[in-house]
Amino acid sequence: MRRLSLESLIDNLILLLGAAVMIFPFYWMFLSAFKTPAEVNTTPPTWVPATFNFDNFAYAFNAAPFARYFLNSVIVTAAVVTLSLVVTIMAAFAFSRLKFPGRDVLFSFCIALMLVPFEMIVITNYATIVKWHLTDTLIALIIPFTSSIFYTYILRNSFLSIPDTLYYSARVDGASNWQYLWRIMVPIARPAIVTIALLNTITSWNAFFWPLLVVNTKLNRTLPLGLYSFITDGGIRYERLMAGATIVVIPVILLFLVARRNIVSGVARGGLKG
Amino acid sequence: MSVAGGLPTPSTGTAPRGFALGRFLTPLAFLLPFLIGLVIFTLFPIVNVFLMSFKEKYQMLTGEFTQYGPGNYVLLFKDPYFLNGLKNTALYVFTVVPVSTALSILFAYLLNKKLRLNPLFQTAFFLPLVTSVIAVGLAWKWIFNFDYGVFNFLLSRFGVEPINWLNNPNYSLWAIIIYGIWSYLPFTIILLLAGLQNINPLYATAAAVDGASKARIFFRITLPLLAPTVGLVLIINTISASKVFDELFPLFNGKPGAAYNLYTVVYYIYEVFYVKFRLGQAGAAAVILFLIVLIFTLVQLYLQRNWQHY
């Protein structure tokens, strides 16, 4: 018994140390955001701020248009998530429920396309956006991301698990494919749909490379891009940068706290990386 | 797609039965938005980038080029910045991926031993998954700061002289590697935890009844059974780490290291195409990146097939 509890003590100590290392950059970010310029640059550093001052947040919202960045991020994320949900739900329905010659070949082809890195196709996509005169618009941040093969793949698997008999009885009762999809299939597949909506929200909120390419002016920046410009616009003042960083991460952290299980199970299916 | 020989589809046709086109109309209507996006923003760009990589002296706006040839690839492999990018990317991948995987095995194993996963631990270990690379990268930039950074402060407690992590070319790669290891942990732990939960606990119980020590059970039973998941994680992380790019922006203000010593393959693509407008060469570098990803994907498929017996 003694040996066991010693072992569990060591386990817990290692886990606590690991958890502390993982959480530390966030702690340090939030802490520094509340410090005064004088307190930030002290050695040894203080581990709790002397006073909680909100000047740095006020500066972020006044000197740089962080409120505008926030709004842009919300618009782009909402549009990407909504549009890609509609598009991928329809596609997943065709790939799982409808029968047509060449369906499985077409689907396998799409799966093969998944291995192409986004960084590779970005060159042509940028040229396309330039050609369509869409540079420096929020539309440019939205339209390349409506057709997600990966989300279609997850949804198709979920749709395939719904019994055929349900479909035929609904059709006999006079429901069209369209009605069947939105009134019966989508409510049943809700967990999978919520999962991809969450993963897509996180990915879209944090997107950096594509906005970096297509956005040129301040007013069209999303939060990560605005934060990056804050380094050069505002000078390297860490208490201010940390306030900006806090504004960027707080919404997704809240989302994570609310939907942790769903996000983690989605990630376990390979949902965020690559 | 061939129309002949298709299965009868009693329920999908909106056109009269027997009319071959009708078989496609409904599916097409559902697939159209998806296919349009796919063709414009994925399929066409892939074909185009391959073609572009062989167009010598290609101009994006006019579409002019001198001839098709391997010239861009020759330029690419003569460019010291590209070679520097390949080297740094390889160093990054071959340190970040094994180290973070080894640490993840430890943490996943310990987390799996608990009957109920403490939400506090879960939040702490998985939070970096959802947060912006730019925001968290700035926090790391601040941690790595030479004068007031907390990392140098902690090291000074062990008698280590302050290190100029971000501005000294000898250390900047290490800074990005340390940040990389940290940021790969959550995803890796989640996948390994899922792998551990799929192992039947009866094996370990049986071995324990036979008197095997915990360490022996771990190395002789748990680890071999976890091998397919470890292999999968190694490949996924290798592919993902090969595309290291975003991290350079918060840490080095958008430069590839303070002394332009930290090019990566993707940063090189970005610079050649977006700053220098040398599209053919950027296309060639993108094709090389694709080949790297392709090779690792093929290894993954091969391993998955050969590990089926577990």
Image (cartoon, helix red, strand yellow):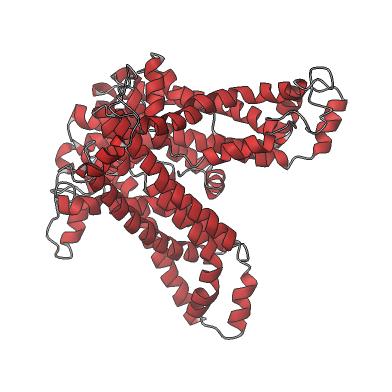
- The percent position of residue A29, horizontal first and vertical second, equals 29, 43
Residue lying at the far top in this picture: please name it.
A133
Total count of labels: 0
Q: Nearer the viewer, residue A147 or A272?
A: A147
- The percent position of residue B182, horizontal first and vertical second, equals 35, 53
Left or right? Give the position of A130 relative to B18. left
- The percent position of residue B141, horizontal first and vertical second, equals 24, 44
Left or right? Give the position of A209 relative to B123. left
**Which residue is painted at 71% across and 30% down in the image?**
B2
Q: Nearer the viewer, residue B186 or B41?
A: B41
**Which residue is painted at 32% across and 16% down in the image?**
B62
Q: Is residue B271 above or below residue A215?
A: below
**Which residue is painted at 31% across and 23% down in the image?**
B65
- The answer to whether residue A214 is visible is yes
Name the quarter where the C terminus of chain B is drawn: bottom right
- The answer to whether residue A52 is visible is no
Q: Is residue A145 above or below residue A199?
A: above
Residue lying at the far right in this picture: please name it.
A172
- The percent position of residue B237, horizontal first and vertical second, equals 43, 52
Q: Nearer the viewer, residue A75 or A13?
A: A75
**Which residue is painted at 35% across and 18% down in the image?**
A136
Name the quarter where the N terminus of chain B is drawn: top right
